[in-house]
Image (cartoon, grey):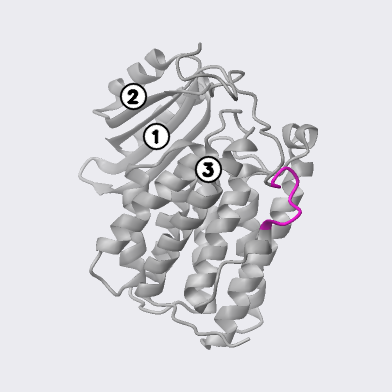
Amino acid sequence: MHTKVTANAVAMKRWLSKAEESLGNHSDRLNAINIFPVADGDTGTNLYQTVRAAARAAHDADTSDLGDLLAIAGMAAMEDARGNSGTLFAVFLAALAEPLHGTTRLTCTLLASSLHRAQIRSWSALSDPVPGTMLSVLEASARGAAETAAAHTADDSNLALALTLRSSVQEALRAVVQTESQLGALTAAKVVDAGGVGFLLILDALRAAALGEELQDELLDGLHGYDIQAPHIHNGGDADGVEVMCTINLSPLDAATLRLHLDELGDSVIMSAVTEVPEGYRWRVHVHVPDAAPALALIHQAGEPVNITVTQLAAPAIGAEAGDS
């Protein structure tokens, strides 16, 4: 197969556009198998909306520097992140940019370094990271890229990049399959992790955009729970509490203190630095809590938050009317 490699800034813009399109096409099915960490049936929607913000920012960016381009996209994604999955994607994208500053072309070595950085940052952003999720798929993709790149040391050829991208996607696919046996809720429902599948779609979009190829429509064939005729798995209405998100400027010490207090109130705590500011850093904050008021009180005590959203975790039951309780 002839591969046309165009791993430059134009390709990175095309990557995010392809990812947006792919997630838009798959969002309903991702929502249908979304049962972890809460069965709120919105993983596909959250990923789609967050990637869309990144794609629009990248489209408008006037730079050929890959690091600068993805940093702009990552910042936009962070500011408009939705849910656990969207927030983790934003962290991933911002971290992916870091080793790419000053370069205009992706290579196998740079790809491996970027995925490794993104893996570390994504795991550290969560207070309680759990295997069998999007994090495991990211870890596997980084490992696949690192192993292939190591076999092509100092090789900046298009072929080496193609092999590394394909290895990354294949390892991610294996990790998605394994999620079903890593989390009890997924094992019981006989499905793979929705966030993991979404991240796999994002990686395949990167492969396609960088190599000038098409998306692999057959990539998801056989994944448990993902067939189009498979039922909705998430249990609408069973998830208690709310999801609180905001952006706030804090010093690293104050951010660590706020994270500690939010851990005591709820779970799924994610705090990631968006950019440096005079006070320290601009942080994106995400937490699931039984009641928003105590969490918001802590956040307001720490600083002056903006972009505050409070969303009920319970999803409407399948087939329920919009006004049903």
The residue at the point 58 percent across, 88 percent down is 2
Q: Are marks 3 and 1 in contact (CB under 8 Å)?
A: no
Q: Nearer the viewer, mark 3 or mark 2?
A: 3
Q: Which is nearer the eye, 121 or 91?
A: 91
What's the CA distance linking mark 2 and mark 1? Answer: 9 Å
Q: Amino acid at mark 3?
A: Gly
Q: Are marks 2 and 1 in contact (CB under 8 Å)?
A: yes
Residue 146 can be seen, yes or no: no
Specify whether 280 is left or right of 4. left
Q: Using the image, determine if residue 96 lies above or below residue 23.
A: below
Q: Nearer the viewer, mark 3 or mark 1?
A: 3
Q: Toward which corner of the image does residue 155 lie, by quadrant?
A: bottom right
Residue 194 can be seen, yes or no: yes
Q: Are marks 3 and 2 in contact (CB under 8 Å)?
A: no
Q: Amino acid at mark 1?
A: Val
Magenta span: helix, strand or loop, mainly?
loop
Q: What span is in magenta?
A: 220-227
Q: Amino acid at mark 2?
A: Ile
Q: Using the image, determine if residue 295 lies above or below residue 253.
A: above
* Residue bearing the label numbered 2: 299
Instruction: Give the position of the N terminus as an image quadrant.
Output: bottom right
Where residue 117 sits: x, y (%)?
50, 60
Determine the secondary structure under disc 1.
Answer: strand
The residue at the point 54 percent across, 39 percent down is 43
The residue at the point 38 percent across, 13 percent down is 293
